[in-house]
């Protein structure tokens, strides 16, 4: 199912998280209370969990899940992340890494995780029940553990004894029913213990036993002897056996149980006695313990419950969220945007192929990831929206819904909204865009087809007549319902049948809520829910309620509710107008009219009918919500006259017709009051309304009108006529105005759906993603090409100079007049300009491309805390690892190449450099040593320094070793300066044998270090001072592909020497050369320097003119094993060159490390200085050997 | 339009089953190599020698930014060296087992169409002073013997490496 690329991504991502985890965990060790750190760890864990769960890697998911629980304990402070815990976490991290590797290799998780799970449980439950005892102990091998384990085993043995005792009694046929109960109890108790200890496998055994027992208990009364026997076999015997298997080393259990297991099935009297005896003893000895254990078990269970609860309580609050730092947010936004982009293309494809499961899965996946991330970061709206979309997608996936155009459009809108939210979150950290409209649409889509059946499917979603119709009907009902509500409220306010009225109100609200639910208007439902809550609360004390109470109730429910609803439908003239009239009427009050109740009741029943009739049109309605803006809807409504609407409705619902006829009357009454009201008036009126409520019995006269009007208002013609007052309505109630901020957006669901997304979509698109993932190979290719370009630049320079020469020549040969000359010189000047520009652009390009490959060196540094941590595990040293200049950027390849050498260096520093605590104290140094990793730029190089404040390198030791190893004689050693001496540790062979005397200091693998660093054209300098410390300075070029080089000529060939290897160059007189044992030497800075003729070394033809000249050029190179002077024919100067590899068979042992293409297209070979020096030495020794033989 | 054309083409290959070869000369001997392995044929390119390399390794050339080794086929096959060499050499660039390599030859002929069935396995006897291991097959063409070379054997990298190391160890001893 999961394709490879997905897996790869997963592995990659997880590995990144693991890397982060590692560094966090190591920091946690030193600062266990750092909440931020715990959050980071939790975050990584959570992401891994989510991804692995999604991909079905059950072990990783299970492990991370448990670790998450554990981390929760740390976070809420109920546990402290001590060393044991951190070690566990680190081990778990490693295990996850293993699992990932396995998954990558074979697609299977083969590594076991049970041991870790047990440890997690032990750590999680450890300190709580055992109190102080267990806490400090290491989980698996401490004294306390053994003790704990011992106790557990005792209990286990005792428990099993009891079990078997009961079983034996059962086998004898005594009190079978009771025995089964007893057995169940006992197993239960044992299970509790196992749970407490975190032995999952054991728990599983008990669970199995319990299942059988429970199954048996139902028929235990009728069970025969055979049944019982079978039961016992399947439970007690097999269970005990399994437990024995689980604890192969626990002798107590083994001996006792086996005996019983053998005897029990036979159920011989003799054995029974034995058993009884034995069991009695057991019981007595273990009795006390068992009791304790039970108590413990209970305790532990309680504790666990607490623990489970607490984190959950915390989660909603999510302290993490506020703390979410910017970079996290950025990452989140970036990632989400990537997902959104993917979503978009998937969604668009989905539109054309709605049944594509794979596509749905992809969409679901993206959605899920976004949900997870936003949930984690506490972006509640995104999370809520995606969650709902997931549910919807699930419906598509299981085929219960079809992803039709409406749905896809909804998904796309939702996608855009998420994009908006992300943008807002990035800008302000707040989600300001509303999502309620989308949620409503999701609900509408999700629930839509079910009631509507097949009818709706073919209809075009957005602009069908039917939508407007459905919405109209809904509005009708709503208005009618509200009318009834207010009618009842008025009656209540008059003090009539308060109790009954409350009931009626509740009923009415309930019914309205049902409609709202049906329509999928969540915001509306919420209003009703609030109202209901108040009403229910009130109903309990309704009998004793005074007028004030009633008034308050009405205010809080009916008035505010109606206002909120008005806000929700600001464009719905019917409601707005009608309510207004009611409200206006209420203060005016006093219009007697009990007819209201009668008229009111008829709409209600009508509504019920309406509701029944609705489903047929529901889908259309849904479509209307999605498609048309309200304005359009209403304008269309206005255009259609009453008759049309009536006709239209007849098809759908006969009752609607009745309304339409009633409506005509009410219509005319309403407009005047509504039209007059401006905002202030309205406010005043509302206040009045509130006051008037106190005097019972007003407003009935208008109420019926209102209710009727509502009913009518739904009819389009009327709605049209009353349209004017609506805008004022929403603002009326001061309470509501305050809330309006919240509701403003959901209040206009239809407009938002159509209008808002568009501009916002643009804004979302305009924020371009800030990072991309590119295959490293592509970047390398690009780098190569750019390198080529940079080199080509120099060929232009050459062309220019050739051009100048040509001009000269032509001038000379064919004298030109001034004008012609100007022409030519003008051209050459332009060529020069163009060349300069090309040069500038190409070097800028080179720089930029180089930057693309750059990574902060923290990528490298972050690998080492773990190393130091592991190295220190078995020592009593204390080391503070410090970083400086982590943000220094370095070529990705260089970083990769540096990783290993750095390990050697750091290991040396930790193992040999920094002294033990005692030694340090004795020397007066602070107890904990300092290991500083530092990086900074220096020209076109990066310097990395590893500094420790340890004991330094013992130079006398080096001398001694050098003599022992016969790598140098005493004399040379005496003459060597400190630097040369230190450099000796980097000679191959020096270090390896050094390991015999472990204390002798650095040197382990230093030759490897040096070679690796030189491979990337770097240099290594060791600086040390006795008892002060050691500093290893690595100097590496910013990039590998282009190197500065010294161009030389030798034997007629153009040859390139990497500048990093060149120490100095100078001209030498023949007289300065002297010969020692037939090899040429010279003194350089009073040091002997062996000279090698490059032409000899490489068997190149000797240029006659070079030989005749009494002077030579010498290039002093420093190689892995010392300095050497190469005698060359000519120095040509410095140049940046692009390294090109040679075919392996050409390059191997050739003395060349590659080639480069010069400006004129010719090839220059690049010297491999190290190899040449080795070659020279070999040849030297062979020559001496030959001389000795001769 | 194209269809009948393609069809006739296929028919002809079906009936004759010929092989297209690039023919070239070293001295008076004619050789052939499957046209599919030939990347291109270039002339007059400066060859940068590699010091201290086996003598048949002529050097490297710059082929549009890539550095390609060039092998002198005459020296590699240990064919007779003529008194004076034409300095104007041809280089056939072949892709042999994924490696792009240039081979220096005296001159290149036109593309040859050789019936598949006329190609015979290499004879046991030495042909034109050439070890049979380097020969893929031979065929008669216009009264001449055309030798199809086995370039994967000629460019056996391990052998070249060995040759190099042998040479290296010999050098100091000779001095």
Image (tube, rainbow, N blue to C red):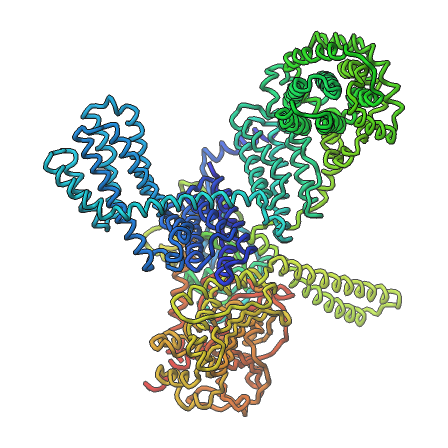
- What's the residue at 16%, 36% (across, down)? A264
Q: Is residue B104 visible?
A: no
Q: Is residue A35 visible?
A: yes
- What's the residue at 63%, 73% (across, down)? A1134
Quadrant where the C terminus of chain A is found in the figure: bottom left
State left or right for residue A260 relative to residue A57.
left
Reply above or below: A603 against A728.
Answer: above
Question: Camera-side residue: A315 or A1041?
Answer: A315
Q: Position of residue A1024 (x, y in %)?
A: 50, 80
Question: Camera-side residue: A492 or A943?
Answer: A492
Residue A472, quarter of the rendered image: top right
Question: Camera-side residue: A800 or B110?
Answer: A800
Residue A917, quarter of the rendered image: bottom left
Reply above or below: A943 against A984.
Answer: above
State left or right for residue A1139 relative to residue A1002.
right
Reply above or below: A568 against B80.
Answer: above
- What's the residue at 83%, 10% (across, down)? A665
State left or right for residue B134 relative to residue A335.
left
Q: Position of residue A840 (x, y in %)?
A: 72, 63
């Amino acid at each position: 199912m999961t394709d490879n690329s997905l897996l790869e991504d997963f592995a990659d991502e997880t590995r990144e998280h693991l890397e982060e985890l590692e560094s966090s965990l190591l920091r946690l060790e030193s600062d266990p209370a750092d909440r931020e750190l715990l959050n980071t760890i939790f975050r990584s864990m959570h992401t891994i969990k989510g991804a692995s769960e999604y991909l079905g890697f059950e072990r990783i998911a299970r492990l991370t899940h448990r670790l998450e629980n554990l981390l929760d304990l740390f976070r809420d402070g109920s546990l402290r992340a001590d060393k044991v815990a951190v070690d566990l976490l680190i081990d778990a991290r490693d295990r996850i890494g293993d699992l990932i590797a396995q998954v990558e290799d074979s697609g299977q998780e083969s590594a076991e995780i049970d041991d870790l799970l047990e440890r997690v449980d032990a750590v999680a439950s450890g300190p709580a029940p055992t109190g102080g005892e267990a806490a400090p102990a290491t989980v698996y091998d401490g004294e306390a553990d053994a003790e704990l384990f011992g106790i557990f085993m005792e209990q286990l043995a005792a428990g099993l004894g009891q079990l078997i005792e009961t079983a034996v009694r059962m086998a004898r046929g005594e009190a079978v029913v009771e025995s089964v109960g007893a057995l169940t109890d006992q197993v239960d108790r044992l299970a509790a213990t196992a749970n407490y200890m975190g032995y999952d496998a054991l728990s599983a055994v008990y669970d199995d036993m319990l299942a059988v027992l429970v199954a048996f208990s139902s028929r235990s009364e009728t069970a025969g002897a055979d049944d019982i026997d079978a039961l016992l076999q399947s439970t007690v015997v097999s269970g005990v056996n399994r437990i024995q298997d689980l604890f192969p080393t626990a002798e107590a259990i083994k001996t006792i149980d086996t005996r019983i297991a053998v005897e029990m099935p036979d159920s011989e009297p003799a054995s029974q006695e034995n058993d009884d005896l034995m069991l009695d003893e057991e019981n007595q000895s273990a009795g006390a313990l068992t009791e304790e254990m039970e108590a413990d078990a209970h305790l532990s269970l309680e504790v666990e419950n607490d623990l489970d609860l607490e984190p959950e309580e915390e989660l909603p609050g999510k302290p993490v969220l506020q703390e979410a730092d910017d970079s996290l947010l950025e990452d989140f936004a970036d990632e989400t945007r990537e997902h959104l982009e993917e979503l978009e293309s998937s969604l668009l494809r989905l539109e054309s192929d709605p049944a594509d499961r794979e596509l749905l899965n992809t969409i679901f996946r993206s959605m899920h990831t976004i949900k997870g991330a936003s949930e984690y970061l506490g972006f509640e709206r995104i999370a809520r929206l995606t969650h709902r979309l997931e549910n919807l997608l699930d419906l598509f996936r299981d085929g219960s819904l079809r992803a039709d155009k409406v749905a896809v459009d909804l998904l796309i809108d939702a996608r855009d909204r998420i994009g908006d939210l992300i943008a807002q979150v990035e800008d302000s950290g707040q989600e300001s865009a509303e999502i309620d409209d989308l949620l409503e649409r999701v609900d509408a889509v999700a629930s839509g087809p079910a009631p509507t059946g097949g009818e709706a499917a073919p209809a075009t979603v957005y602009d069908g007549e039917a939508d407007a119709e459905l919405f109209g009907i809904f509005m009708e009902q709503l208005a009618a319902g509200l009318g009834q509500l207010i009618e009842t409220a008025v009656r209540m306010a008059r003090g009539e049948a308060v109790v009954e009225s409350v009931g009626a109100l509740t009923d009415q609200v309930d019914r309205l809520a049902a409609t709202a639910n049906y329509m999928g208007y969540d915001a509306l439902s919420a209003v009703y829910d609030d109202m209901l809550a108040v009403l229910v609360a009130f109903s309990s004390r309704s009998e004793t309620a005074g007028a004030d109470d009633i008034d308050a109730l009405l205010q809080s429910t009916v008035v505010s509710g109606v206002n909120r609803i008005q806000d929700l439908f600001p464009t719905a003239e019917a409601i707005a107008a009608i309510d207004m009239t009611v409200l206006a009427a209420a203060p005016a009050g006093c219009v007697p009219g009990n007819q209201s109740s009668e008229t009111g009741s008829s709409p209600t029943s009508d509504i019920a009918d309406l509701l029944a009739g609705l489903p047929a049109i529901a889908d259309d309605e849904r479509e209307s919500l999605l498609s048309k803006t309200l304005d359009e809807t209403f304008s269309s409504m206005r255009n259609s006259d009453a008759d049309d609407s009536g006709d239209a409705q007849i098809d759908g619902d006969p009752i609607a017709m009745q309304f339409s006829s009633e409506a005509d009357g009410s219509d005319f009454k309403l407009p005047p009051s509504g039209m007059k009201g401006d905002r202030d008036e309205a406010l005043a009126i509302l206040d009045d309304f509130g006051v008037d409520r106190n005097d019972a019995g007003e407003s009935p006269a208008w109420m019926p009108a209102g209710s009727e009007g509502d009913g009518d208002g739904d009819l389009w013609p009327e709605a049209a006529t009353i349209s004017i007052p609506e805008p004022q309505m929403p603002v009326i109630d001061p309470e509501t105005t305050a809330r309006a901020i919240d509701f403003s957006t959901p209040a206009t669901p239809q407009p938002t759906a159509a209008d808002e997304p568009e501009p916002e979509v643009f804004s979302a698109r305009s924020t371009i993603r800030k990072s991309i993932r590119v295959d490293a190979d592509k970047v390398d290719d690009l780098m190569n090409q750019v390198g080529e370009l940079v080199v080509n630049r120099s060929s232009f320079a050459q062309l220019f100079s050739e051009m100048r020469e040509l001009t000269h020549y032509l001038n000379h040969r064919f004298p030109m007049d001034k004008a012609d000359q100007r022409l030519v010189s003008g051209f050459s000047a332009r060529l020069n300009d163009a060349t300069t520009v090309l040069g500038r652009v190409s070097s800028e390009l080179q720089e930029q491309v180089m930057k693309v490959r750059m990574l902060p060196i923290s990528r490298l540094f972050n690998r080492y805390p773990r190393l130091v941590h592991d190295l220190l595990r078995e020592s009593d040293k204390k080391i503070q690892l410090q970083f400086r200049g982590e943000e220094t950027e370095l070529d990705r390849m260089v970083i990769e190449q540096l990783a290993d050498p750095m390990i050697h260096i750091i290991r040396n520093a930790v193992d040999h450099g920094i002294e033990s605590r005692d030694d340090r104290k004795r020397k007066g140094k602070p107890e904990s040593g300092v290991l500083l990793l530092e990086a900074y730029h220096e020209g076109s190089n990066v310097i990395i320094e590893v500094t420790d404040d340890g004991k330094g390198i013992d130079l006398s030791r080096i001398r001694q070793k050098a003599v022992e190893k016969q790598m140098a004689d005493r004399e040379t050693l005496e003459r060597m300066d400190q630097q040369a001496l230190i450099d000796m540790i980097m000679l191959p062979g020096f270090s390896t044998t050094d390991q015999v005397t472990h204390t002798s200091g650095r040197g382990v693998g230093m030759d490897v270090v040096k070679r690796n660093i030189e491979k990337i054209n770097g240099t290594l300098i060791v600086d040390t001072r006795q008892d002060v410390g050691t500093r290893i300075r690595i100097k590496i070029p910013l990039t590998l592909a282009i190197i500065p080089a010294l161009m030389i000529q030798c034997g007629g060939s153009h040859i390139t020497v990497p500048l990093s290897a060149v120490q100095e160059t100078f001209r030498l007189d023949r007289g300065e050369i002297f010969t020692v044992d037939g090899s040429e030497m010279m003194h350089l800075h009073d040091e002997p320097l062996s000279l090698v003729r490059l032409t000899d070394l490489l068997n190149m033809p000797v240029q006659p003119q070079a030989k005749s000249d009494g002077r030579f050029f010498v290039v002093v190179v420093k190689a892995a094993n010392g300095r050497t002077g190469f005698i060359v024919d000519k120095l040509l100067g410095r140049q940046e060159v692009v390294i090109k590899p040679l075919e392996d068979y050409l390059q191997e042992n050739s003395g060349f490390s590659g080639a480069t293409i010069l400006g004129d297209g010719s090839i220059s070979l690049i010297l491999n200085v190290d190899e040449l020096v080795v070659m020279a030495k070999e040849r030297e020794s062979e020559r001496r050997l030959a001389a000795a033989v001769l | 339009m194209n269809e009948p054309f393609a069809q006739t083409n296929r028919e002809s290959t079906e009936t004759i089953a010929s092989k297209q070869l690039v023919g070239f000369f070293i001295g008076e001997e004619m050789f052939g190599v499957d046209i599919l392995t030939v990347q291109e044929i270039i002339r007059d390119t400066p060859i940068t020698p590699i010091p201290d390399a086996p003598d048949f390794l002529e050097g490297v050339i710059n082929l549009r930014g890539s550095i390609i080794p060039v092998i002198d086929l005459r020296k590699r096959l240990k064919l007779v060296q003529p008194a004076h060499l034409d300095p104007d050499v041809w280089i056939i660039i072949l892709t042999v087992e994924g490696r792009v390599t240039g081979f220096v030859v005296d001159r290149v002929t036109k593309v040859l169409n050789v019936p598949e069935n006329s190609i015979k396995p290499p004879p046991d006897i030495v042909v034109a002073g050439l070890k049979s291991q380097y020969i893929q097959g031979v065929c008669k063409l216009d009264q001449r013997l055309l030798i199809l070379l086995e370039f994967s054997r000629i460019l056996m990298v391990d052998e070249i490496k060995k040759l190099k190391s042998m040479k290296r160890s010999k050098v100091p001893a000779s001095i």
